[in-house]
Amino acid sequence: MILDAALRWQFVLGAGLPSRAIAWWGSGYNGWSHVDAILPDGSCLGARSDVIGGVKAGVQIRPPAYEKWVRRAVLKLPCTAGEAAEWETYLRSQVGDPYDKADILGLIIGRPISSAGHWICSALQTDALERVGKLPKLPLTPQQVSPNTLLAMLCAIGAQCTSS
């Protein structure tokens, strides 16, 4: 029996110009450019548009510290063991799905042009949280949620920053 069940994420800021633009667009200064789920073994599950360390783009499981970040914050949300298992199972079921480049363009131009079966990092994590009941059904689609918006929602429902 898991006594300390929790869901964990890393919110990060990458060094490149695209990362800086995503962070600024989503929050202005001090924003985040990417979010990964942190699995119990410490690996990171998320959607990325680039190949890093030989791991292809899209929804993949990557090793801890797979990239050098400008900054990083880890959030932890208490949950039941059942919620943790359902969350991880759902996220793992998405591994191999493509990255949603159209969704990024849609966010920039303000139009819903996401592609079914494709993910951006924050949409994947938002969808998983809605599926396990940790977030209510939102009045916007997961594809409209930036990393910064997701971080704010997580803090609002009780997530705590455990490291930076």
Image (cartoon, helix red, strand yellow):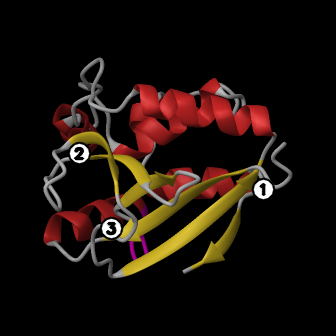
Give the percent coordinates (x, y) of residue 72.
45, 75
Q: In the figure, 96 relative to 76: above or below?
A: above
Residue 29 shown in magenta: yes
For mark 2, give the secondary structure: helix
Kindly give the residue lying farthest to the top in the view shown.
116
| Residue at the spot of label 1 | 158
Q: Is residue 134 visible?
A: no
Q: Residue at x 51, y 60 (%)?
A: 42
For mark 3, give the secondary structure: helix
Which quadrant of the structure image shows residue 156?
Answer: bottom right
Q: Nearer the viewer, residue 65 or 99?
A: 65
Q: Residue at x 43, y 45 (%)?
A: 122
Q: CA distance from mark 3 to mark 1?
A: 25 Å
Question: In the image, which residues are magenta?
Answer: 27-31
User: Sequence-wise, which precedes: disc 3 or disc 1?
Assistant: 3
Q: CA distance from mark 2 to mark 1?
A: 30 Å
Q: In the figure, 49 relative to 22: above or below?
A: above
| Residue at the spot of label 3 | 24
| Residue at the spot of label 2 | 108
Give the percent coordinates (x, y) of residue 146.
42, 49
User: Sequence-wise, which precedes: disc 2 or disc 1?
Assistant: 2
Q: Residue at x 15, y 52 (%)?
A: 50
Q: Is residue 18 visible?
A: yes
Give the foreground label among 2 and 1.
Answer: 1
Q: Nearer the viewer, residue 17 or 159?
A: 159
Q: Is residue 160 left or right of residue 43?
A: right
Give the foreground label among 3 and 1.
Answer: 1
Q: CA distance from mark 2 to mark 3?
A: 12 Å
Q: Is residue 58 left or right of residue 13?
A: left
Q: Amino acid at mark 3?
A: Trp
